[in-house]
Image (cartoon, rainbow, N blue to C red):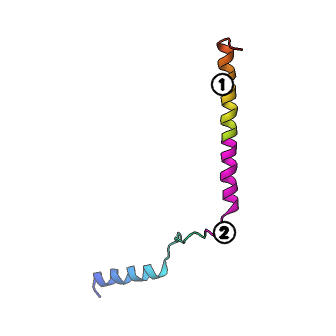
């Protein structure tokens, strides 16, 4: 058996024995993952709350420094 045929045979066996751990599948849009949806909306709400709080603090600091209040 030549070296080329031996390598061809081992690569064929290797492909048959091994399989990919990461398989692609189509997402099921009829059943959304409610945990991920909740985390997405919850984190968005928290970020908006922090943004509004920081804005209020900045406006108050601006008014205090410029003698507007």
Label 1 crowd (10 A; few <14 / some 14-19 / many >=20): few
Q: Which residue is mark 1?
A: 58
User: How many marks on residues?
Assistant: 2
Extreme residue in the top direction? 67
Q: Residue drawn 39% across and 82% down?
A: 12
Q: Is residue 32 left or right of residue 14?
A: right
Range drawn in magenta: 29-47
- Residue 2: x, y in percent? 27, 85
Q: Quadrant of the C terminus?
A: top right
Separation of disc 2 and disc 1 at Cα?
A: 43 Å
Q: Residue at x 49, y 77 (%)?
A: 18
Where is residue 47 drawn, in percent x and y? 66, 41
Whether residue 31 is in magenta: the answer is yes
- For residue 31, above or below residue 65: below
Q: Tell me what residue is drawn at x 53 percent, y 69 percent.
A: 22
Displayed quadrant of residue 67: top right
Disc 2 + disc 1, Cβ < 8 Å: no
Residue 51 lies in quadrant: top right
| Mark earlier in primary sequence (2, 1) | 2
Is residue 41 one of those drawn in magenta?
Answer: yes
Residue 14 in the image: x percent, y percent? 43, 79
Examine the rendered structure and indicate whether residue 47 appears above or below residue 53: below
* Residue placed most toward the observer, 4 or 15: 15
Of residues 4 and 37, the one nearer the viewer is 37
- Residue 64 rendering spot, x and y as whole percentages: 69, 15
Q: Secondary structure at mark 2?
A: loop
Q: Is residue 36 above or below residue 45?
A: below
In the image: residue 32, left or right of residue 8: right
Return the residue found at the far front: 68
Q: Which element type, helix, strand or loop, lies under badge 1? A: helix
- State the predominant SS element of the stretch in magenta: helix
């Amino acid at each position: 058996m030549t070296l080329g045929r031996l390598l061809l045979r081992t690569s064929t066996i290797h492909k048959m024995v091994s399989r990919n751990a990461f398989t692609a599948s189509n997402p099921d849009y009829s059943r959304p993952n409610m945990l991920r949806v909740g985390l997405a909306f919850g984190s968005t709400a928290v970020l908006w709350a922090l943004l509004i709080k920081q804005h209020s603090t900045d406006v108050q600091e601006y008014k205090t420094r410029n003698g507007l209040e």
